[in-house]
Image (cartoon, grey):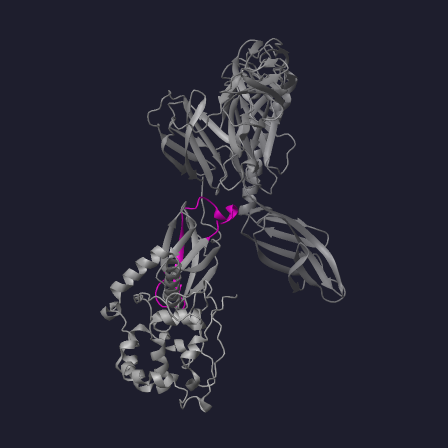
Amino acid sequence: MPFPRIVPSALWLVLHLTAGPCRRGAVSAGRAARGATEVCAKGTMTASPCCAIPAGTNVTLSCQLAAPRARGWCWAAIFLNSSEQTRAQGGSVSKTLLVTAQGRHHFTCKCIGGGRTALVCGIDIHCGNPPDEPRNVSCIQKGTQGRPTCTWHKGRLTYLPTAYGIELSNGTSTFSFPEEAPSQVLFGSGALSELDFGSNYTVVVSASNPLGNASSQPLTFTLTDIVKPLPPEFSVEFDDSSGTSCTIVWHHEAQAQHCRLRHRPLGRHGWSTVESLSRERFHLQGLEPDTAHEFQVSCRMLPGQGLWSDWSSSQGSTPAAVPTGTLDVWYRQQELGSGLQNLSFFWKALSRWEAGGRILCYNVTLEALGQGELWAQSHRTTQTSFSRVTARAGHRVTVTAQSPRGSSAPATVLTHLGSPDLPPPQRVRAEGLGNSSILVSWSPPAAAALPLGGYLVEWAEPWREPQLQPHHSWVKLPPSHLSTVIAEHIRDNVCYQIHVSALYQDRAGQAASVRGNSTAQAPSAGPQMFTTPWASGALVSWEEIPAPQQRGCITGYHIYLHRKDGQGQPEVHAVPAGAPRSLHLPHLEPGEHHELWMTAATAAGEGPRGNSDSVCLDGAGDWLTLGLICSFFILSACLCSVPPARRVLQWLLSLLLPQWHSKAIPDPANATWAKSLAAAKAELSAPSSPFLPGGAFEEPEASPVQEAPAQPEPPKPPDKEEVGSAGSRGHGGWAAESSAEEQQLPELYQRLLLEAMEPPEPVAEYICNPGSLAAEPAPEPEPSPLSAFPASAFLPAALCCPGDLTLDRVKLSGSSWPSVSAHAIQSLTCDTSE
C-alpha cells in the first residue's frame, strides 16, 4: 500500500479515536452538570440540559440582564423560535419547557419596555436520536484497476451531527476511512485504499453523535468477491445457410474467466439465457429466421464467485430460411341449394421459426372428387382464410405457405363432414375452469369402418353468425388424447358451442356438441314473454335473452303463474334449456285473472324476472260448446248433401227416433170426418150452392208454380190460410193435432180437402190437360219416414210438366173460401219459367 495514503489515514484514525471519548465525556458531563451558559454583552442565558437532547426532555431556561435600565422598569422575556413563552418584571426570568419536536430549537432572551423590544442573548438546543446500527454494508470495485468503495444504510435520521467511518482490517493492521460527503441522507459511502487479490479483508462501519455510538456487523471478503468487471466487447456473425444460427465472439478483461449470454427477438420482453461460457466464442442455434435480434453478454471473475459485469448489447437480423412447419387447416361447409355449397377454409399461421421468416403468400388447391376427370383449381392469398362456392361434392384441399426461400410441406383435408358411417365421440362434457379456459372431455367413438386418426375440437359463440365470428378456433389432437383445455379466444361469462369430431384419414366424422363457458353469472335480464289464451289455458312463448345479457350458458327457464288476488304461492313451471320456446299451461279457471312472468338461469343462479302479462279466460267453456255444436250441424249438412251418406244418416235416425216415427202416416181420406162429409160432395158442384152468389161460378186466378232451386232458402212460417201450413209442423205432434183440427176446420175447408183426396190420377190429368178426363191409375207412393206430411195428399206424385212442384210455391187464389171448388183446382197450371 503506498505510504502517502497510509500517513493521512493513520492520522485521521488517531484523531477520531481520541476525540470520540473526549466528546462523549464532555456531553456526559454537560448532561450531569448545569448544562450550558451563553454569556452576552447585555446579559446571560442558561439552558439545562444542553445542547443535544433526546425527544421528550424537560429543559430549564433562565435569563439574567447585565444591568437595570436607567429609565423605568424592563420586562425580561424568553422566546422559542420567535414565540414568547414567559416574561417577568425585573432583571431575570426562568421557565421549564418540554421539548418533543426533533430538530434545532432557538431560544432567546429579550428586554421589553418603553414600547421597544431588545435582544439580550440566545442559545440553541438540538433534539434528536442516537445513531442506528449501519446495515447492508457492501463493497465493490469496478474493473480490476478501480478503487474499492463501500456503501451502507444509515437507518433513521438523527437530526444531530453524526460522524461515520470505515474500519478496514486485513488481520494484521486496521485502517480507518471517513465518510465521503457527510450529509443527513439515508445512505453513506466511503472509498478504501487499493487491495490485494491474495488477502482477506474485514470492514466495520461505525457511527457516533452526542447521544451515542453504533457499529455495523463485520463484512469479510476478498478482492475477487468485490471486483465487478467492465462490460465485455463482442460481435455477432450470422450463418446465412440456415438462417437460425450465429457465432458470438467477445473480448473481456484478462482476469474475467466466466461469461453469460442472453438474446431475444427485438421488441419482445422475455429473454433466452445461456450461461457457463468459459471461452470467448460461442455458436448459438435456434434463432427465429428473418428476424431482428438483440444480444447481450456479461462476465465475472470466476465461475460462482465475483460480481457480474453490466450487460453489453448488440443487435442483428437473421437471414430467411425454408419453411419447416406444416399448416394446420380446417374448413366450414354451408349448403346453398341448387347443387351448390360454400366452402370456407381456415389455417393457423406458422410461427416465425417454422415459417423460416416472412411468409409471402399461401397457395390453395381445390380438387373435386367423384368426377370422371380430376378437376382442380389453384388460388393464392395473403390471408389465413379462403372461401369459394363450388359444386356440391367432396373436395381435397391442399394449402402451402410460401416464403422467400421456398414452400412449406402441403397440408391436406377432405371435405366429407358428417359421414354416417363415421360415428362421433361419446359422452362429451364441458367444464368451466375460470381464467378464460374450458375443459372439454369425451370418450372414444363406437366401432367405425376406418381407423381413428385423432380428434378435432371446434368452438364458437352460438348466437353469432359464422361469418361474424371474430375467430374460427379449433385444435387437432392425437388419438390418445381424450380431453383438452381450450383457452384460445375464450372470454369469461360467454357461452360457447363446442363440437368434437373424430378424424378418420384426414376427414371428420359426425360431430358431438355441447355448450360450455369459462365462468358464468346470473343473467342480467329476463326473457321477453308472450301469452295467448288457448284451449282452456294459456300458450306461453318467449324470445331468447340477448347474448350480452345471458352472461353464460342458459341452463333453464322458470315460468311463474300467480293469481292476481295475491293468494297463495305462484305456480312454477320449469323448462330445460334446448326445449322449444313455448309451453301450454292448461286448466285455467275462466273469469279469473292470472299473472305470468319468466326468469332464466345459468350455473351461477337465477336472473331477474322479465316482462309480466295477465290472462283471463272469459267463458271459454261456453264458446267451446257453441263451436262444437256448430261444427256438428255443418258436418251433418255436408253429409246430407251426399246421397249415400244421407241414406246412412236416415237409417241411423230411424234407429234413434221413437217407434211411432217408423209407422206409416194414416191417409186423411179414411178419416171419420171425411167419410161423414162425402155426401156433401154433390153440393160443392151444384149451382145453387149458397157459397156461390147468384148461381155464377167465379174462376180464381191461376197461381204460378215455380221450380224449386237446388238449395232453397229456409221458408218463412206460412199463414194458417195456406195449404201447406199443416205440413210445416213437427212429426211428433201430427197424431194429436189431426183430431183437434177435425173440430176446428170450417166446413168449406173440409169439403175442399175431400176433393183434394180424390184419386190423384184424374186430378193430375185434369190439372195438366183440362181437355182430357181419362187417365190410368198410378200406384200410391209410400210415405217417407223423413216427411212431415205426404205430398200425395194434396198433389199428384208425377206432373206432366217439367220441374219440381213444391207445396210452398202452391197458393190458392180467391176472394173467399166458399168460391173454391173442383173447378178451381182445374184452373191450376204449371209455370216452369225462371
Q: Residue furthest left?
A: 659
Q: Position of residue 359 (x, y in %)?
A: 61, 20
Q: Position of residue 469 (x, y in %)?
A: 55, 36
From this view, report whether residue 143 is shown above or below residue 469.
above
The answer to whether residue 617 is left or right of residue 114 is left
In depth, the one of 94 and 39 nearer the eye is 94
The answer to whether residue 439 is left or right of residue 110 is left
Q: Quadrant of the N terminus?
A: top right
In depth, the one of 71 and 57 nearer the eye is 57
In depth, the one of 189 and 789 nearer the eye is 789
Location of residue 267 (image quadrant): top right
Q: Can the viewer see residue 193?
A: no
Q: Position of residue 220 (x, y in %)?
A: 50, 22
Q: Position of residue 483 (x, y in %)?
A: 39, 29
From this view, report whether residue 359 is shown above or below residue 608.
above
Q: Can the viewer see residue 79?
A: yes
Confirm whether the magenta stretch covers residue 575. Answer: no
Location of residue 783 (image quadrant): bottom left
Specify start and end residues of the magenta stretch as a single range.
Answer: 542-570
